[in-house]
Image (spheres, rainbow, N blue to C red):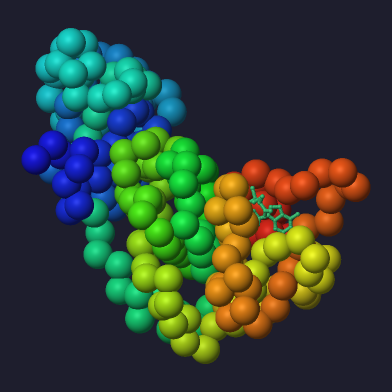
Amino acid sequence: MSVRRDPDRAVLEGFHAVKHALRFGAEVERMVCADRTTVQELADMLAPDVAGAMAQAEEIGDAAILEMTAMPPAGGIVAVARRPAVALDVLLADPSPRPIVLLEAPRRLGNIGACVRVAAAADAAGVLTTGVSDPWHPDALRGSAGLHFALPVARVEDDVSFGDRPLVALATGGTPLGPGVVPPRAVLAFGTERHGLSDALLARADARVEIPMREGVSSLNLATAVAVTLYSP
Ligand SMILES: C[S@@+](CC[C@H](N)C(=O)[O-])C[C@H]1O[C@@H](n2cnc3c(N)ncnc32)[C@H](O)[C@@H]1O
């Protein structure tokens, strides 16, 4: 089986993805690079905290790196790590006010990665997805710059229970987003890029919240909507 399709592995393509994975404690099994001097120079300049670990990358040359990846990775570095197990019950029971981001059946892997990246930056409790897309696909990891390792990220069933956490649907026609509108410990649900949230999820939601937009604008990009919501006071 190709390592890119191995459900137990995370393939990290490019300097920033490898950097964040190392920084947030990924269990890296293999790290290879086109040219170790290039990697070391980048690490010394941009990530001295993980420069020692990156110096362990095995030098295999340009051609071998290009064979492993769909696109040339930044800095010519690729790593394979174990995907961390996510304990859903522990995540849901987390008593802190931090929200969970729920992406309902997202389609674009780059979008999933961008959502994970901003969720990590905003210190959300975790990111859950439903539907067929693998949130740990190498292209999603590129989009998150490896920040999947900074918080729990997992795929769940459509009818998963969120326990005592309030489910807040982000959709037009709801209460305008503003101070105090989103309750603590919320599960913030965002819909698919094309169709928005399903009727089933809207029916389950405890609240519906919208990000105000100028007349004539239909919607925000999925990752932009996640960013605005997470950073709203
Ligand atoms: C690209 S939008 C989906 C657009 C889709 N055509 C629709 O009608 O909902 C992806 C998701 O981002 C969120 N979103 C985008 N703009 C929003 C807004 N102004 N208010 C609340 N949520 C928004 C929603 O959860 C939406 O399902």
Q: Quadrant of residue 203?
A: bottom right
Q: Is residue 53 left or right of residue 145?
A: left
Q: Is residue 22 above or below residue 124?
A: above
Q: Is residue 55 left or right of residue 117?
A: left
Determine if residue 226 is in view: no
Q: Quadrant of residue 18?
A: top left
Point out residue 70 in the picture as x, y percentages from the top left corner: 29, 24
Q: Is residue 29 above or below residue 39?
A: below
Q: Is residue 175 left or right of residue 76?
A: right
User: Which quadrant holds the N terminus?
Assistant: top left
Q: Is residue 20 above or below residue 96?
A: above
Q: Is residue 196 left or right of residue 131?
A: right
Seen from the viewer's position, the closer of residues 79 and 104 is: 104
Q: Is residue 45 above or below residue 195?
A: above
Residue lying farthest to the right in this orientation: 215
Point out residue 223 in the picture as x, y percentages from the top left corner: 59, 47
Point out residue 8 in the picture as x, y percentages from the top left corner: 17, 53
Q: Residue at x 55, y 53 (%)?
A: 192
